[in-house]
Amino acid sequence: MKTDEQLWTAYVAGDSSALTDLLERHRGPLTRYVAVKGVKDPADTVQAVFIRLVETGLPPGMDFKYWLYQAADELAQEQRTSDRSAAKWLDTPEAEMLAETYQR
């Protein structure tokens, strides 16, 4: 069985199936981890983690699993912050006005 780092190196070298292998290997545990963090849609957050991985790459010498869970923590925090901001905004007079206008 290849290590995460070996699979990542294979993906970077052009083997797209290596990314699929990484996703399949980490999807379940990472989804459960993110769910415990209180995000609304853990599957979307896991997808965002892998999108970030593909967009930014793995820093040289970085442990793959460490990076993955660090990114999951950051995205979960961003989502919780965004959700709180949206919830606060929904309690404003402006939000009420927009809701009333929409219902007309």
Image: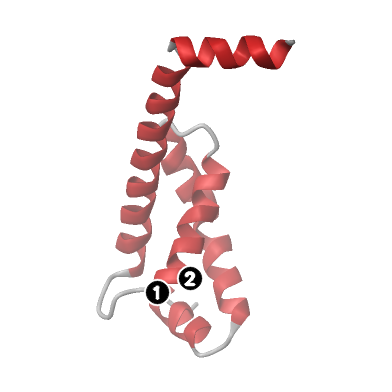
Residue 47 image point, x, y percent: 55, 54
Where is 78 relative to 97, above or below?
below
Q: Is residue 8 visible?
A: yes
Residue 6 sits in quarter: bottom left
Residue 23 image point, x, y percent: 55, 63
Q: Is residue 37 visible?
A: no
In the displayed orientation, state which residue is furthest to the right: 104
Query: Which residue type carries mark 1?
Result: Gly
Which residue has dot 2 on it? 54
Q: Residues within 10 Å of mark 2 (few under 14, many from 20)?
A: some
Q: Nearer the viewer, residue 67 or 55?
A: 55
Q: Secondary structure at mark 1?
A: loop
Which residue has dot 1 on it? 57
Q: Name the residue at 52% across, 40% down.
A: 42
Query: Which residue type carries mark 2?
Result: Val
Q: Look at the numbered discs 2 and 1 and tell me whether their residues touch, using CB distance below 8 Å.
A: yes
Q: Name the residue at 39% across, 18% down.
A: 88
Q: CA distance from mark 2 to mark 1?
A: 5 Å
Where is 77 relative to 83, above or below?
below
Q: Nearer the viewer, residue 49 or 86?
A: 86
The quadrant the C terminus occupies is: top right
Q: Is residue 61 left or right of residue 13?
A: left
In the displayed orientation, state which residue is furthest to the left: 61
Residue 83 image point, x, y percent: 43, 29
Q: Residues within 10 Å of mark 1 (few under 14, many from 20)?
A: few
Q: Is residue 102 left or right of residue 38?
A: right
Q: Name the residue at 48% across, 15% down.
A: 94
Where is 97 relative to 8, above or below?
above
Q: Secondary structure at mark 2?
A: helix
Q: Nearer the viewer, residue 49 or 96?
A: 96
Q: Name the residue at 43% across, 41% down.
A: 34
Residue 99 sits in quarter: top right
